[in-house]
Image: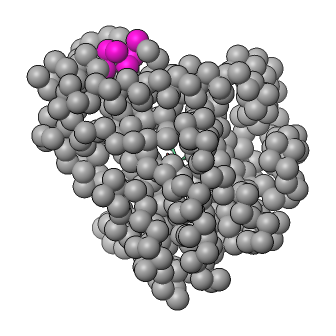
Amino acid sequence: MSSSVSQGTSPKDLVRENIRNLRPYQPGKPIEEVEREIGITGAIKLASNENPLGPSPLALEAAAKMVAQSHLYPDGAAYYLRRDLAELHGIAPEQLVFGSGCNEVIQMLIGAFCVPGKHEVLSHKYAFISYRLQTLAHGCKFVEAEVTKELGCDVDALLAKVTENTRLIFVANPNNPTGAHLDKSQLEKLLAGVPPHAIVVIDEAYHEYARVADADYPKSHDYASDRPLLVTLRTFSKIYGLAGMRVGYGICSIEVADFLNRLRRPFNVNLTGQEAARASIRDVTHVQRSAELARDGIAKYRDAAAELGIVAYPSLGNFLLIDVKRPADEVYEALLRMGVIVRPMAVWGLTTHLRISIGTDEQNERCLNALRTVLK
Ligand SMILES: Cc1ncc(COP(=O)(O)O)c(C=O)c1O
C-alpha cells in the first residue's frame, strides 16, 4: 500500500503541536532501577504514596482466584463492584463511572466536556499534575490559580480565575503533593461560588486517610444532591493498596456518568482488580490500620522537622511535603545513594522541596536517619 507520507517525514512534523510540547509524567523511581544504577540492594521507595502495608489479605485472596480466569474478558459494567460501592456510598449504581485508576476518569472528564482550543480547565498551583498534563494533551488551556501561604487552594483566588470558558475545576482534597486540604467552610464557599457552566471535580484519592486525620474533613458527595455538576473521584490505589491493579472511580449524577461511559474504553477495569477492590472494601480493619500508620508517621516527621531545620507542611494524606531549605535535588540524590527513594518537586517549581510518602515505622526511621545524615 502506498503511503502519502514520504520516507523523510519525521513524526515530529506530524504530531499535534500540544503533544510535541508536552513533558511526560515522571513517576517515582522504581526500586529495581535505583538498585541497578547505584549498585545497592535493599532500597526503599517512599515516592508514590503507596500503602506500605500492601493490599488487604482478603484482596489478595480474591485476586488469586480470578487469575485463573484471565482468559475471560472482565465484566465491562463492573456489576458487582458497582453494586458494592453503590451500597457503601448510599447512591444509585448508575452514578458510578469506573476507570483504570481515577487518572482515567480525569481523562474521560476532560475528553467528554472540553472542546480543544476553546475550553479551559482550572485548578491551582501545585495541584495534582495529571490535571495539567491531561488538559494539555487534549489541547485545552490549563489555568492555575495562586495558592495560600501554606501552598493550599485559595478559594477566592480560584473563583477569580473562572471565565465563561471554564468547563472543569479540579481540586484534590487533600491535594497531592502539598497535603493541603479544604475544610468544610472552604469547600462550601467553593461550591457556592462556581457558576452553573462549570463542573467541579473534587478528587478524594486520599479520602480514607483524611477522614481519620480530621473529623471535620468534608466529604464532597454530601453536597451532591442539589448539584448535578459535582463529581467526586476515589481510588483503590492509595489506602486500599491496589495501585498495581488500576481501579478508580467517579461518583456523579446519572446523566454525567452516562456521558462519561460513552467515552470509556471497553473492559477498562480488569477482572482481578474488580474482585480485589470488592474484597478490600470489606476489610475495614486494614483500612483503619493503614490510616493510623500514616497519621503516626506524619507526626514523627513533623516532630523531627525542627531538629532537622526543615519545614514540614501539614498533610491529611499518607505523604508530606518538606522544605529542606537548600537545593532539593542534591538532597534527593544523596538519599538515593543511601537507598531511600523520595520525590523531588522541581517539576512543580518547588526546588527546595521533597515529598515523602509515609512508610512502615522501620522505613520512616530509616528515611529520617538518612535525612539527619544528609542535612547535618
Ligand atoms: C490526588 C490524586 N488523584 C488521583 C490520583 C490517581 O490515582 P490512580 O490513577 O492510581 O487511581 C493520584 C495518584 O497519585 C493522586 O495523588
x and y percent of residue 46 in the render? Answer: 39, 28
Q: Nearer the viewer, residue 21 or 196?
A: 196
Q: Residue at x 62, y 21 (%)?
A: 289
x and y percent of residue 28 in the render? Answer: 38, 36
x and y percent of residue 169 in the render? Answer: 54, 69
Q: With respect to residue 83, does 335 lie above or below?
A: above
* Image side of residue 147 versus residue 292, left or right: left
Q: Which residues are magenta?
A: 362-367
Q: Residue at x 65, y 26 (%)?
A: 288
Toward which corner of the image does residue 284 lie, by quadrant? top right
| Residue 364, magenta (yes or no) | yes
Q: Nearer the viewer, residue 67 or 224?
A: 224
Q: How is the image coloured?
A: one colour
Q: Residue at x 52, y 22 (%)?
A: 293
Q: Nearer the viewer, residue 329 or 17?
A: 329
Q: Residue at x 49, y 41 (%)?
A: 316
* Image side of residue 47 versus residue 60, left or right: left
- Outermost residue to the bottom: 164
* Image side of residue 148 versus residue 286, left or right: left
Q: With respect to residue 17, does 331 lie above or below?
A: above
Q: With respect to residue 303, does 2 lie above or below?
A: below
Toward which corner of the image does residue 160 lie, by quadrant? bottom left
